[in-house]
Image (cartoon, rainbow, N blue to C red):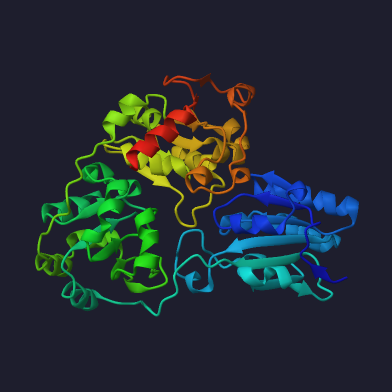
């Protein structure tokens, strides 16, 4: 049997920013919108079994693909016509450590009968002759500007010195490592350098006078970026793909995080006491960025039930230096936008997957005698629902329930990607024997429900 993608193919579609371009390849009445790739792939397996016809599951890139492995193995040994269609980053981003970018072929190569890689523009004409099921079609989706810049890795301090001599107004973008980068950020700030520390660095409160939104508006003022730590979450970082500013990264993984740039495989935390590094920095002229007078605080007062206002109230509720675990995706962005206090912040930013977020916070709580606070969105919580029954006494779970995957709304993607719902977590928490509240109290599961209208209005005013 030959296989060709056609509009009659039933597809369990798991929304992601990477695979939203694939929506156009399926008829709307044949789409089954899902949020959990593992569950969705087993549903597809069951339908393929009873119908005897190919059924597809469509995922975004990264860990979403790995969630289908159990199903692919079952399909292969049961000879079921299952088709995995994954949206992937363009080829030039592979092996760079860019967000949600892993080697999909390595993940499924022992689970599928046929693997094929195809560019998005060639997908409609793809026809497989007598393929062996299950099939994995990996679609390369190019969303970055082509250029001839190159990647230089395995560099050292002498290379950094040459880089520093060619720039005049860099931005120091400090992301994260396993240990806090707070001592390093303090030292950089003491030199009056332009520093933006993301929340996972453990030092965002030291640079909270700057927000990512304000940096986006004045990014033309810096001529280069010095990135310290793993791949940043910041949108500003992703925009470098099209803006091509010179970039030098200190990343112990030796990964550029972009399709170009210079990288030294030096641990970020070790730079704190690196005399050569700071001697080089002393030669940089202090040239401050424009001060952004606009503050988000008046908007938090004007829209008290917006998601950002609720996040600020939550931070005020938490003790200083508390251990906080942040789930993807809007949670970590909104937390950073309003953070002014010091916290010990953890998250899953290696591949940026939303799977297992509550479980990871449980592991952190089990390794600590302190109280741990896990903050996740409603879709992330649903993804890891069974972990709620295992919450240890020293873990408080906050669920920001905005009724869907609102990250896709902010990206202005098709409404089907949002997967709106009216699910609440009260009955689940109580069924698992956990205390529950809709207020900031001492309950183990606290569900906070922002007003989406207020969130939209706040963001619109903030961005204008």
Q: Does residue 112 lie above or below 395 as drawn? A: below
Q: Nearer the viewer, residue 4 or 12?
A: 4
Taking the spot 49% from the left edge, 57% from the top edge, the residue there is 351
Q: Nearer the viewer, residue 375 or 321?
A: 375
Taking the spot 39% from the left edge, 38% from the top edge, the residue there is 459
Taking the spot 52% from the left edge, 32% from the top edge, the residue there is 402
Q: Is residue 401 visible?
A: yes
Q: Nearer the viewer, residue 249 or 361?
A: 249
Location of the N terminus by quadrant is bottom right
Location of the C terminus by quadrant is top left
Q: Does residue 423 lie above or below 127 as drawn? A: above
Q: Does residue 190 lie above or below 383 as drawn? A: below
- In the rendered structure, the answer to whether residue 217 lies left or right of residue 194 reads right
* Location of residue 6 in the rendering, given as x and y in whole percent from the top left corner: 78, 62
Q: Nearer the viewer, residue 43 or 387?
A: 43
Q: Is residue 372 visible?
A: no
- In the rendered structure, the answer to whether residue 234 lies left or right of residue 166 reads right
Taking the spot 70% from the left edge, 59% from the top edge, the residue there is 25
- In the rendered structure, the answer to whether residue 398 lies left or right of residue 88 reads left
* Location of residue 308 in the rendering, given as x and y in whole percent from the top left corner: 38, 33
In the picture, residue 267 is in which quadrant?
Answer: bottom left
In the picture, residue 120 is in which quadrant?
Answer: bottom right
Q: Residue furthest front?
A: 464
* Location of residue 319 in the rendering, given as x and y in whole percent from the top left corner: 31, 29
- In the rendered structure, the answer to whether residue 140 lies left or right of residue 223 reads right
């Amino acid at each position: 049997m030959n296989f060709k993608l056609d509009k009659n193919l039933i597809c369990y579609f798991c929304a992601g920013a990477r695979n939203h371009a694939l929506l156009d390849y399926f008829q709307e009445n044949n789409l089954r919108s899902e949020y959990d790739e593992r569950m969705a792939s087993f549903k597809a397996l069951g339908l393929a079994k009873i119908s005897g016809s190919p059924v597809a599951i469509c995922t975004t890139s990264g860990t979403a693909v790995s969630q289908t492995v159990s199903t692919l193995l079952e399909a292969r040994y049961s000879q079921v016509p299952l088709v995995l269609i994954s949206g992937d980053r363009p080829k030039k981003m592979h092996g760079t450590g860019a967000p949600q970018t892993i080697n999909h072929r390595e993940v499924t190569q022992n689970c599928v009968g046929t693997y094929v890689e195809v560019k998005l523009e060639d997908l409609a004409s793809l026809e497989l002759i007598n393929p062996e099921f299950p099939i994995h079609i990996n679609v390369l989706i190019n969303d970055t500007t082509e250029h001839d810049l190159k990647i230089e890795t395995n560099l050292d301090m002498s290379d950094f010195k040459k880089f520093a001599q060619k720039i005049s107004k860099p931005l120091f973008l400090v992301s994260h490592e396993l240990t806090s980068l707070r001592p390093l950020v303090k030292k950089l700030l003491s030199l009056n350098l332009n520093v933006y520390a993301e929340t996972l660095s453990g030092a965002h409160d030291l640079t909270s006078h700057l927000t990512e939104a304000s940096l986006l508006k004045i990014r033309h003022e810096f001529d280069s970026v010095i990135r310290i730590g793993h791949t940043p979450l910041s949108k500003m970082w992703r925009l470098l793909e099209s803006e091509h500013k010179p970039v030098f990264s200190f990343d112990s993984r030796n990964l550029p995080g972009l399709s170009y740039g210079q990288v030294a495989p030096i641990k970020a935390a070790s730079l704190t006491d690196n005399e050569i590094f700071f001697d080089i920095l002393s030669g940089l002229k202090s040239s401050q960025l424009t001060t952004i007078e606009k503050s988000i605080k008046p908007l938090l007062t004007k829209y008290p039930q917006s998601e950002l206002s609720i996040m600020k109230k939550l931070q005020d509720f938490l003790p200083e230096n508390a251990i906080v675990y942040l789930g993807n995706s809007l949670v970590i962005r909104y937390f950073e936008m309003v953070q002014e206090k010091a916290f010990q912040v953890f998250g899953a930013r290696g591949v940026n997957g939303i799977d297992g977020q509550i479980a990871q916070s449980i592991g952190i709580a089990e390794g600590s005698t302190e109280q741990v606070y896990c903050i996740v969105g409603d879709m992330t919580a649903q993804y890891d629902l069974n972990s709620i029954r295992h919450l240890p006494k020293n873990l408080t779970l906050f669920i920001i329930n905005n009724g869907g995957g609102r990250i896709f709304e902010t990206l202005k993607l098709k409404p089907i990607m949002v997967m709106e719902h009216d699910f609440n977590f009260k009955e689940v928490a109580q069924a698992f024997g956990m205390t529950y509240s809709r207020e900031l109290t001492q309950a183990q599961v606290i569900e906070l429900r922002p007003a989406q209208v207020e969130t939209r209005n706040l963001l619109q005013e903030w961005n204008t």
